């Protein structure tokens, strides 16, 4: 049973299991920021024991050190993580200078990410999410996981992201990626679109960001997407598994973000979508942070 799909009216809500995919040279705030937000999230604001998330760390060695000197002990290595991949609801990929060594050596977490997508495509009945922060999006691009989707990254690396996405699309004979200048971009989100999706304040349809001519075939633009967040579990209708399976990557939610503080915004979105919007607002209040919302692209009607 998916931890996210559980309903408190039917009994205790299961904890949402999160795995941070570490490597040498990750960015400190890309890990510490989301960890702070997820750790504070509660299913019930009046019950301090109703923790919504359980976070663990995977690394290629016993302990991983960030570019700023923070060392985090890994709960498991990548071999174990690949074996237990079905246990996790969310993978978080931090950015950091070490990303470029990962790309150069084609090392983990690349294989773990690929296996996670294969699992979703094989079993779309469970809701799964990948959150790539900052230049972490480059790993998704390298693996062809952004083909036909929209994405963002740190502004200094828009061009690098576009290049990787174009190379992947050419290699795989697949669709291009829309690189957007946003705080965060959510693909395969799921909440009620309503009777008229064009009037939904949380959605931008893919057709709204299609190229306008041959000179913009690979163009990057500031999106006109409407901003917002909403918890899909608040919908009164059940999601169609068949519809989810027909979506890219088996309907896996893919979130990419801009620079390090954008990871805080996307983490709040994650709380809003997997727990409740009220929970996300409460966490933002507790840490005295103003949530700057990103965009969702081509969500589905649940």
Image (cartoon, rainbow, N blue to C red):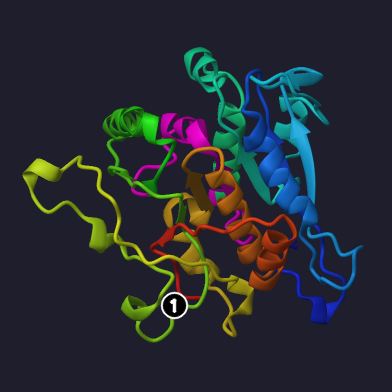
**Residue ID at (25%, 48%):** 221
Q: Quadrant of residue 296?
A: bottom left
* Category of crowding for the residue at label 1, using alpha-carbon neighbours closer than 10 angstroms: few (below 14), some (14–19), many (at least 20): many
Q: Is residue 27 above or below residue 152?
A: above
Q: Going by the image, does 15 lie left or right of 122? A: right
The residue indicated by pointer 1 is 193
**Residue ID at (24%, 62%):** 207
Q: Quadrant of residue 220?
A: top left
The percent position of residue 82, horizontal first and vertical second, equals: 70, 33
Q: Quadrant of residue 195?
A: bottom left
- The magenta-colored residue range is 121-149
Residue 272 visible (yes or no): yes
Q: Is residue 51 above or below residue 238?
A: above
Looking at the picture, tell me which residue is in the foreground, 145 or 222: 222
**Residue ID at (47%, 59%):** 188
Quadrant for the N terminus, please. Answer: bottom right
Q: Going by the image, does 191 lie left or right of 52? A: left
- Count of picture labels: 1
């Amino acid at each position: 049973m998916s931890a996210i799909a559980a309903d408190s009216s039917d009994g205790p809500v299961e904890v949402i299991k999160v795995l941070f995919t570490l490597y040498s040279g990750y960015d400190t705030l890309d890990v510490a920021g989301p960890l702070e937000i997820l750790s504070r999230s509660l299913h019930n604001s009046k019950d301090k024991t109703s923790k919504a998330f359980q976070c663990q760390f995977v690394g290629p060695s016993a302990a991983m050190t960030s570019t700023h000197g923070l060392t985090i002990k890994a709960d498991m290595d990548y071999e174990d993580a690949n074996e237990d991949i079905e246990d996790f609801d969310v993978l978080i990929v931090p950015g950091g200078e070490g990303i470029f060594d990962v790309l150069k050596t084609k090392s983990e977490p690349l294989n773990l990410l690929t296996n996670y997508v294969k699992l979703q495509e094989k079993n779309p009945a469970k809701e799964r999410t990948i959150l790539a922060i900052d230049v972490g999006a480059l790993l998704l691009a390298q693996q062809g996981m952004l083909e036909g989707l929209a994405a963002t990254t740190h502004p200094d690396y828009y061009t690098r992201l576009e290049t990787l996405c174009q190379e992947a699309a050419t290699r795989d004979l697949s669709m291009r990626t829309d690189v957007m200048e946003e705080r965060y971009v959510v693909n395969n989100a799921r909440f009620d679109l309503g009777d008229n999706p064009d009037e939904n304040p949380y959605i931008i349809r893919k057709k709204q960001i299609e190229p306008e001519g041959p000179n913009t075939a690979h163009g990057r633009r500031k999106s006109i997407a409407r901003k917002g967040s909403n918890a899909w579990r608040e919908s009164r209708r059940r999601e169609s598994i068949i519809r989810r399976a027909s979506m890219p990557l088996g309907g896996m939610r893919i979130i990419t973000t801009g620079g390090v503080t954008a990871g805080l915004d996307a983490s709040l979105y994650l709380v809003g979508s997997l727990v409740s919007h009220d929970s996300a607002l409460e966490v933002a209040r507790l840490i005295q942070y103003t949530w700057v919302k990103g965009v969702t692209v081509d969500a589905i009607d649940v």
